[in-house]
Image (cartoon, rainbow, N blue to C red):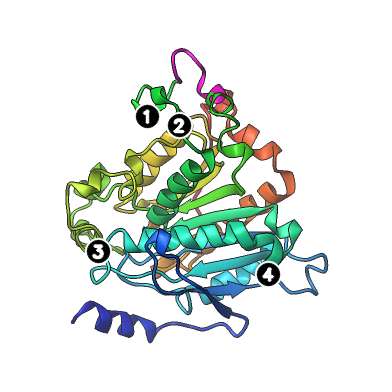
């Protein structure tokens, strides 16, 4: 069975939402995107949210860069999320591997983020535009992290020579605390970028593989180690290119990122990807929280056997609760997440 036939088989299980809308934006040659990008969109009801949406959530869907769609794959829970949290939820389609390997997907996802940055106020209102959240699940987490690296660099502008030469470490530059680096660079990410929060859910952040992938073997919970390798081969066949942060964001410099929420299950082959990426957020002085679900496999709370189980529903409920608290209490929440008395992180080890 070829990839397109496999995709069509998966689509037979989709449940489509009556409240979902779609629209398309044109491609841009300067971003090497030459075709329109389609978005799925869910809006909260005026009955529950008479003052309009509280924010915007741009989500990059999962599927190992090979499978998945903006429409149908996650309709039910994204409709629920939009209504419960008062968010406009946007999901762009992107080109799939192996027919369209790296960098097609990340180019298209970045263009989707640029469009939201440029059009949020006009399309969704000033209130929503002030609370822009970006997220990704599984391979979508990889794309989200790569897009954040690109957008941070685009907003930050030219870097000084000492930065380009790699003199920056997680502890700072020439004795400067990492918290001061944004000011030294002319304001840095958090003073310019519109993205207030990143929601990174059981992502794959090193396409070359982390220790938990190697140790997972062929246990068939959701994915096996061999599956993870196959997806990586489809997305980026060139093993040297996998060392690039644009392909494997775990290898990147995450200075000046927005606060992030990480979610993963301990029964996930990609568990170390989340643990190591979470550590990056801490090292570079960013606000971060981590939810670990001991019994959870890949997809806990979102797809697979634990999409709607007691464990899965608890996971999703907690994630929504944290986003709701962030919207209500931002900017105080990021400061709490950087509380050094907690080691720079709030940890939630949760079970049902």
Front residue (pair 344, 96)? 96
Q: Which residue is mark 1?
A: 164
Q: Residue at x 59, y 80 (%)?
A: 21
Occupied quadrant, residue 273: top left
Q: Secondary structure at mark 2?
A: loop
Mark 2 or mark 3, whichever is nearer to me: 2
Q: Residue at x 47, y 79 (%)?
A: 72
Give how far apart the Cα atoms at labels 2 and 3 are.
46 Å
Q: Secondary structure at mark 1?
A: helix
178 in the magenta segment: yes
Residue 139: percent from left, percent from top:
36, 59
Residue 312: percent from left, percent from top:
49, 62
Mark 4 or mark 1, whichever is nearer to me: 1
| Dot 4 and dot 1 residues touching (CB under 8 Å) | no
Occupied quadrant, residue 210: top left
The residue segment tinted magenta is 172-180
Whether residue 217 can be seen here: yes
Q: Secondary structure at mark 3?
A: loop
Q: Which residue is mark 3?
A: 220
| Dot 3 and dot 4 residues touching (CB under 8 Å) | no
| Dot 2 and dot 1 residues touching (CB under 8 Å) | yes
Residue 159's label in the rendered image is 2
Tell me the crowding category of disc 4: few under 14, some 14 to 19, or many 20 or more residues within 10 angstroms, Cα based: many
Q: Residue at x 60, y 32 (%)?
A: 187
Residue 283: percent from left, percent from top:
44, 29
Q: Quadrant of the N terminus?
A: bottom left
- The first of marks 3 and 4 along the sequence is 4
Give how far apart the Cα atoms at labels 3 and 1 are.
44 Å
Give how far apart the Cα atoms at labels 4 and 1 are.
44 Å
Give how far apart the Cα atoms at labels 2 and 1 are.
6 Å
- The first of marks 2 and 1 along the sequence is 2
């Amino acid at each position: 069975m070829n990839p397109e036939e496999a995709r069509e088989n998966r689509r037979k299980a989709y449940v489509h939402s009556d409240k979902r809308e779609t629209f398309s934006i044109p491609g841009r040659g300067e971003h090497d995107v030459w075709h329109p990008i389609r978005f799925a969109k869910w809006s909260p009801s005026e009955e529950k949210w008479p003052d309009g949406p509280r924010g915007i959530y741009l989500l990059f869907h999962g599927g190992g860069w090979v499978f998945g769609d903006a429409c149908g794959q996650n309709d039910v829970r994204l409709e629920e999320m939009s209504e419960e949290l008062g968010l406009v939820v946007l999901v762009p389609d992107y080109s799939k591997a192996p027919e369209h390997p790296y960098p097609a997907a990340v180019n298209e996802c970045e263009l989707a983020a640029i469009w939201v940055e440029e059009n949020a106020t006009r399309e969704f209102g000033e209130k929503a535009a002030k609370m822009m959240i970006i997220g990704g699940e599984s391979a979508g987490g990889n794309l989200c992290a790569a897009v954040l690296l690109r957008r941070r660099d685009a907003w930050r502008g030219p870097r000084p020579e000492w930065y380009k030469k790699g003199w920056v470490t997680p502890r700072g530059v020439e004795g400067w605390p990492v918290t001061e680096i944004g000011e030294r660079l002319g304001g840095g990410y958090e003073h310019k970028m519109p993205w207030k929060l990143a929601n990174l859910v059981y992502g794959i952040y090193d396409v070359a593989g982390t220790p938990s992938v190697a140790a997972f073997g062929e246990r068939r919970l959701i994915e096996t180690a061999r599956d993870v390798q196959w997806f990586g081969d489809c997305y980026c066949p060139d093993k040297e290119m996998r060392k690039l942060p644009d392909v494997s964001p775990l290898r990147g410099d995450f200075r000046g990122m927005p606060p992030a929420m990480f979610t993963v299950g301990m029964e996930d082959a990609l568990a170390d990807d989340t643990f190591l990426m979470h550590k990056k957020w801490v090292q570079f002085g960013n606000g971060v929280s981590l939810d670990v679900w001991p019994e959870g496999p890949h997809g806990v709370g979102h797809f697979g056997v634990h999409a709607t189980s007691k464990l899965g529903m608890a996971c999703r409920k907690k994630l929504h609760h944290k986003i709701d608290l962030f919207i209500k209490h931002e900017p105080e929440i990021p400061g709490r997440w950087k509380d050094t008395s907690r080691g720079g992180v709030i940890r939630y080890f949760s079970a049902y």
